[in-house]
Each structure stands twice: as C-alpha cells, then as structure tokens.
Amino acid sequence: MSQKKQDMRSALDILDGVNRITRVQGEVDPKFELPAVLAQSPNRSAVIFEKVKGYSVPVVGNLVDRENFALTCGIESSIEASLQYIDRGITNPIEPVMINNAPCREIVITEDIDVMKTIPVTTFFEKEAGPYIMSAIVVAKDPETSKRNVSMNRLLVLGPDRLMIGMSPSHHLYRLLEKAMQLGKTLEVSIAIGNHPAVLVAANAYVDLGFDEFEIAGGMFGEPLELSPGIAVDVEVPAGAEFVIEAEFIPGELHEEGLVSEFHGMYVDYGKSPILQVKGITHRKDPIFQIILPGRFHEHFIIGAMAIETTALRHIRTAVPRVKAAYITEGGMGRSHLVTSISDPRPGEGQKAIFAAFAHCNLIKHITVVDDDIKVDDPIDVEWAIGTRMRAERDIMIIPGVRTDRADPLVKEGTVSKVGIIALREPTALPKAEIPKEIIEKVKSEWKHYQVQVGDKYVDRSFSYIK
Ligand SMILES: Cc1cc2nc3c(=O)[nH]c(=O)nc-3n(C[C@H](O)[C@H](O)[C@H](O)COP(=O)(O)O)c2cc1C
Ligand SMILES: [Mn+2]
C-alpha cells in the first residue's frame, strides 16, 4: 500500500500520538463483558482491548467522536470545519483507484470459513439474538448500472458462513436487492471492517442512489480512496480494511431477527431480514477488529450525525441560501434533533429551513432555527435563543403525520408529528449588552495577566457568552 493515510491504523496512530487511546490489558469476554467495559469507559478516547477471550485478535471501540474525527482527518475540531470537510467530499467527489496486493488481502480464507473463529464478534445486549458486527461498511453494485453503493449495516452472525443483514427499505442497498431479484440475479456484497473515520461518515451520507460513497471519502481526503478488487466477488473494498467478508444474498431466504437495539436505546422488532452466504474472508496481518457499541451510545450517534447534518445543510441551502450551520444534537440521538442557523434571515425563511430539512431526511423530527450569533452545537446558547427570541404562540410549528424512520419509537403507520421551533431575533429585539470589543480582545490576548486566583486554583472565566 502506498503511504496514503486512509486506513484505520493511520487513524489509531494519530490518536496514539495525542494520548487518545486507552488500552485494556485484562482479558475480557466478547460476550457482554467487552461491551460493558466500553459502555463504562469514562472518556471518549478510543479503547483497545488487547486480550479478548478465545482470540488472538485485539478489538478497538470508541474510535469516532467529533474530536477524534477532526484529529484523524487533520481538520480543526469545530462544527463549521467538519461541515465544510464533509461537504467538500460531496461537492468535489474523487473517483477511487484500484490497487493490487492490498493489505486487506494479506491473509485469504476461502475454505472452512468460520466467521466466529476468525473474528471476535461481540454480543452486546441481553435480549438480542447473538453476536453482531456493527462497524462494517457494505459495498454493492447496482445490477442495472454497475454503480457502487456503500452503507453501514448490522450483521448478525447466524452460522460459520451465514450472516443476517439489517437493511431499511428506504435505503439504497434494499433497492439494489429488489432490482437484482426483479432481474433474477444474485446480489454480491463485500463487507469491510476496520475503516478510517472519514470512510465511515461517507458511508452514512444521504445522497442519491448512484452516487458512489467512496467518491465522497476521496473528496474528503482530497485524493482517491485506494480500493482492492474482490477475490470471490466482483465488488471492491478499501485497500487498508482490517477484515473483508465477501458474500452474496441467498435469494428468497429470510431470518426472523428478534429484538435488536436501536440508536434510541430501546429494542425494536423489525421482523424478517435477508441472509448472506459468505464466500471468502480476507484480512490484514495482525488484524484489529473494530466494534461500534450500538444503541444509545456516543459512537453510533456521531457517525450518523455528522453525515446527516452535512447533507441536511446542503438541502436547506437550496431553499435558504444564507443558512450558516447545522448540527444534530446528542440528546437527539445523533438522528432526530437538528439545530440550524441562518445569517440575516428574512421573514418566513425559518419556516422554509424547517420544511427543507424535514423533506430531506425522515429521521429528523425536531428542528430549532436560530440566528448566526448562536452556536448551533452549544445547547446552552440554543436554549438562550429559545428563551429570549421565540414567541410560543407564533413560533412553534407542529406538523402532524409526517413520514418518519421505522426506528422511531413513536412511529404509527410510518408517520409522527414533527416540531419546528423558530427562535429568531425580531427587528425590535432588545440590544445585546456588550463590553467594548477592543477591551475584550485586549483581555483575551493578555489573558495570563488577568487570571484570577481563588485558593490554590486558577479560575478560567470562560468568554463563551461574549461574542
Ligand atoms: C453504526 C451504524 C449502524 C447502522 N446500521 C444500519 C442497519 O443495520 N441498517 C440500515 O438500513 N442502516 C444502518 N445504518 C445507517 C445507514 O448506514 C445509513 O443510513 C446509510 O446512509 C445508508 O446508505 P444507502 O442509502 O446508500 O444504503 C447504520 C449506521 C451506523 C452509523
Ligand atoms: Mn447510497
């Protein structure tokens, strides 16, 4: 592989360099115990489990949070920078390049395939049916156009060479499978595990069918993503992936999944899902297995949130050109609550932003619109705007019966009521009380001089409320 920094290992190296990796040296059981340690981990650094019971493969979890994303993508850690970086990937996509003898093909297994023997797949929740691979990107090709599609899908291990794949009917992979069935073809997939955070976020972008998400990853990196051809199927994966599982859908066979945890932290029952027949497994030498703790946990939120807020912002921009930022909150599970800011909004533009965001993504069901002096990712700032600028009788929109995601805990026949809150400043608003700007700048630049000592501790008086 070339020296390109597009794989999970290069991301881990960066995090290691800034002490954002915790190493767990005690042995942990991949069934419940490992996820329990990850769930209890006090900070958001990545966690590497070095000794996993029954395996010689280490496991990494908690790879992606907003700070780690920024560090591993080489951008500033701010909502504006991440929006700009992901948006660049979508606006200026770069076609991937193919390389041979990629690291992900160092070890090839095509006989006596046994997923659980090779990969330390973890079992997360009490009432789930078994071990789930949650960090995988699933690559498939449109049986009509051959255009590539990349998404993240949960995979339940059913047997040595059989996986159940969870797929929402509103997502592209489902449409590709339907097309294949109509054409009487089998659909092949290549599943890559252990990827760079940028690749994971790209796989979650809400773009049109036919838009290859690997081109978005290339656009984000500013260079083509390196791909490796398949060994048993005609589908490519990132060359630096840790594990690759090549498979095809078994036509007509479905598996009753039982309960599965969703991003809101509750079990849902989606009924029957398709089954994959595994045809080969390849991996790097000394592979590392990546897990994402599913359900109401930070990493599951963040990967989706960063993708959805960027594509929502692009969509809102077509209706409201001066929209500035968009942010999917953590309380909103990285899915359902959006805050968006507009510079110098005209009457009715708050409403237009709300319509555009609801039209864009079924998952979004609660939107707050603020002015551009409000930091969209600061819940205190947003609440201040609601407290000082929103007139409830005029500014709260309740829109009944809007299409929602099937995971929504309140869903009824596919719909819920959605809420828009317009917390925009009126022209007659009271002026903000401010200390002269030049004095604030002087104090900030000479801050050491002004530090206040209380007892033996210095008090850092935050300037976050002074704009
Ligand atoms: C950790 C994680 C797990 C996910 N699991 C699933 C899943 O099991 N089924 C699904 O349909 N979408 C799942 N998603 C969301 C999709 O990957 C995402 O909506 C993607 O944009 C769909 O792409 P597509 O429309 O190209 O198929 C998951 C996302 C994350 C971050
Ligand atoms: Mn797609």
Image (cartoon, rainbow, N blue to C red):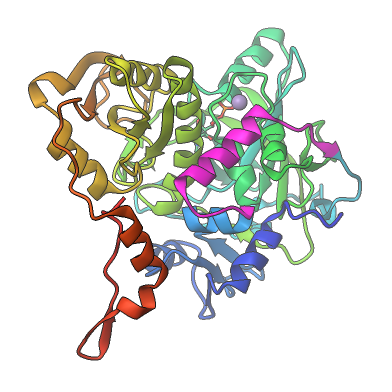
Q: Nearer the viewer, residue 289 or 323?
A: 323
Q: Name the spot of residue 66 as percent of width and height, x first.
A: 48, 53
The vertical placement of 45 against 77, above or below, is: below
Answer yes or no: is residue 203 visible.
no
Q: Is residue 82 magenta?
A: yes
Answer yes or no: is residue 97 visible.
yes
Please tell me which residue is depicted at 30% across the width and 57% down the height of the picture.
464
Given the current orientation, which residue lies at the most extreme top position?
182
Pick the quarter of the image with the N terminus.
bottom right
Left or right of 7: which side holds 433? left
Q: Name the spot of residue 10 as percent of width and height, x first.
A: 70, 61
Q: Nearer the viewer, residue 355 or 38?
A: 355
Quadrant of res 85? top right
The vertical placement of 344 against 351, above or below, is: below
Quadrant of res 386? top left
Q: Is residue 236 magenta?
A: no
Given the current orientation, which residue lies at the most extreme bottom position?
456
The vertical placement of 439 against 248, above or below, is: below
Magenta region: which residues? 73-97
Please tell me which residue is depicted at 34% across the width and 67% down the height of the picture.
443
Left or right of 19: which side holds 220? right
Q: Name the spot of residue 436 as percent of width and height, x first.
A: 27, 54
Q: Quadrant of ligand 2?
A: top right
Left or right of 384: which side holds 75? right
The vertical placement of 405 against 32, above or below, is: above
Q: Nearer the viewer, residue 78 or 25?
A: 78
Given the current orientation, which residue lies at the most extreme left position?
393
Q: Nearer the viewer, residue 243 or 172?
A: 172
